[in-house]
Image (cartoon, helix red, strand yellow):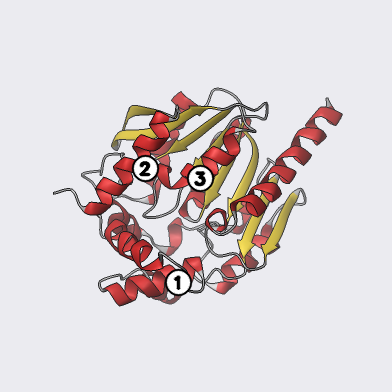
């Protein structure tokens, strides 16, 4: 039976559709996947937005509206078992998710794009960049997931996603949004509903140390890469940021974001967006100079 959160998500998606965003469905090895595809008003390259665990494409609505004035196209997929994408009938492993996302992206992305990923979307973006380097003009990663963890640390990390009570959901929400703010209780209830769904639960259960990133996967990234990390982010272990800051290639850049949390576009959209666009403009300027 649909929950109140399904109704909220449906209304948010409908709002984007009424503004011109198009819902597209694709058959993959994990079932039907949904993506938002929106023609932009700007001249910058297409930008792909990959969401995190328990999130969905519609969560990027405010960011998409901000970026639409600047980019020629916006693409926001719902990962398997999230949003309007089908929940797989088999366990949702990292490998299966990567394969299904690639199957969909191969039919959606037709030219080099900027790829943005937050949290789980970060590791998905990194692996996409390795599998399809010719289609990734640049990577922008906000608190990307996937840093190596041994079993004891990984098990402790998983415990943090046990949102079996409203109190636990509020504590988790504070870890990614920071100090209490208006509406946080409503957000916490929504997070609890989202994280109880089969897709996020299955993906989290299937995570093992061997599916996480190896340092060389970061060191060998070919596209220009920006990693941004809010210093108020308490969702990921503190040493995860060190893994990314120390293993970026020479052309990569790591930026700390004072006062920002796990999903910085939710904290201060204009400031976050300006930093993202400054990086993109630098990439375009370098490409023009090289040409």
Image spot of residue 150 (x, y percent): 47, 71
- Disc 1 and disc 2 in contact, CB within 8 angstroms: no
Check the image and report above or below for 214 versus 23. below
Check disc 2: other Cα within 10 Å, few if <14, some if 14-19, many if 20+: some
What residue is pinned by disc 1? 174
Q: Whole-Å distance between the Cαs marked 2 and 3?
A: 10 Å
What residue is pinned by disc 2? 12
Check the image and report above or below for 71 versus 235. above
**As drawn, is 195 to the left or to the right of 280?**
left
- Depth order, front residue of 206/43: 43
Residue 50 visible (yes or no): no
Residue at the far left: name it.
1
Secondary structure of residue under mark 3: helix
Residue at the far front: name it.
182
Secondary structure of residue under mark 2: helix
Q: Which mark is residue 62?
A: 3
Check disc 3: other Cα within 10 Å, few if <14, some if 14-19, many if 20+: some
């Amino acid at each position: 039976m649909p929950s109140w959160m399904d109704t909220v998500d449906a209304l948010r998606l409908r709002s984007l559709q009424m503004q011109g965003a198009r819902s597209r469905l694709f058959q993959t090895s994990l079932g039907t996947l949904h993506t938002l595809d929106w023609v932009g008003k700007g001249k910058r390259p297409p930008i792909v937005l990959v969401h995190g665990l328990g999130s969905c494409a519609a969560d990027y609505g405010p960011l998409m509206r901000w970026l639409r004035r600047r980019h020629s196209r916006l693409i926001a997929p719902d990962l398997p078992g999230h949003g309007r994408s089908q929940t797989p009938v088999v366990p949702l492993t990292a490998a299966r998710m990567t394969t299904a996302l690639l199957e969909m992206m191969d039919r959606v992305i037709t030219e080099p794009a900027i790829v943005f990923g937050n949290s789980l979307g970060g590791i998905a973006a990194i692996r996409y960049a390795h599998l399809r380097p010719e289609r990734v003009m640049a990577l922008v990663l906000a608190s990307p997931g996937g840093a190596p963890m041994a079993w004891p640390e990984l098990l402790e990390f998983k415990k943090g996603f046990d949102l079996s009570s409203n109190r636990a959901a509020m504590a988790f929400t504070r870890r990614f949004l920071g100090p209490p703010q208006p509406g946080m209780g409503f957000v916490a209830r929504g997070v609890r509903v989202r994280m109880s769904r089969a897709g996020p639960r299955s993906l989290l259960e299937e995570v093992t140390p061997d599916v996480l990133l190896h340092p060389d996967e970061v060191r060998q990234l070919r596209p220009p890469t920006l990693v941004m990390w809010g210093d108020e982010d308490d969702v990921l272990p503190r040493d995860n940021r060190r893994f990314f800051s120390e293993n970026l290639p020479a052309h990569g850049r790591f930026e700390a974001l004072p006062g920002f949390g796990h999903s910085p576009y939710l904290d201060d959209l204009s400031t976050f967006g300006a930093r993202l666009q400054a990086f993109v403009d630098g990439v375009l300027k370098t490409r023009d100079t090289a040409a």
